[in-house]
Image (cartoon, helix red, strand yellow):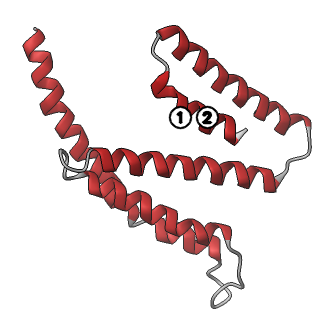
Amino acid sequence: MAFVFVNLLLLRPLLQTHLQHVCQHQVYVLKLIQNLKRRIDFRFDYGFNMLLNVSVGIVNAICWLVWSRQHWQERPYVKKAAISVTLLALTVGLELMDFVPIFWTFDAHSLWHASTVGINYFWYSFITNDCKYLMITEGAEVRKRV
């Protein structure tokens, strides 16, 4: 199923018409419904769920890094998005690993949650800077049209 999502993401720029976009989104929804139905009807497969989530996360990270690279020169604040995505990718190891808790308190999952706290600063800073940039650039275009 993850391969279907990857293929659709790669094909999306090639799709030109509105009808094709609607059809593509219907495929996404149908695959989501199929996945949810599978979860309800059968025993929950933790390994498959982790594989699916990690695959979608990798595709998402790659897409953000590619987007960041494409806009690196015109939007200097984009490096915050790249830093955020890279740090999140590095912390995934804590989520996937399992080890004896340190001081019988801090296990891998709790350390993963703790490590993601600081990353929010970079992402929030990127989002606010991007909104300001879009307000300036898009706002100028809207004023020209009116």
The kind of residue tagged 2 is Asn
Q: Position of residue 35 (x, y in %)?
A: 77, 34
Q: Residues within 10 Å of mark 1 (few under 14, many from 20)?
A: few
- Secondary structure of the residue carrying tag 1 is helix
Q: Position of residue 34 (x, y in %)?
A: 78, 29
Above or below: residue 109 compared with residue 25: below
Q: Position of residue 30 (x, y in %)?
A: 71, 23
The kind of residue tagged 1 is Leu
Looking at the image, which residue is at 63% across and 70% down? 109
Q: Nearer the viewer, residue 112 or 9?
A: 9
Question: Left or right: 100 with respect to 83?
Answer: right
Question: Left or right: 132 with respect to 65?
Answer: left
Above or below: residue 46 compared with residue 102: above
* Residue most extreme to the bottom: 103
Question: Left or right: 122 with respect to 103?
Answer: left
Q: Residues within 10 Å of mark 2 (few under 14, many from 20)?
A: few
- Secondary structure of the residue carrying tag 2 is helix
Report the number of discs. Answer: 2
- The label number, if any, that marks residue 10 in the structure image: 1
Q: Nearer the viewer, residue 36 or 18?
A: 18
- The label number, if any, that marks residue 7 in the structure image: 2
Q: Position of residue 17 (x, y in %)?
A: 47, 10
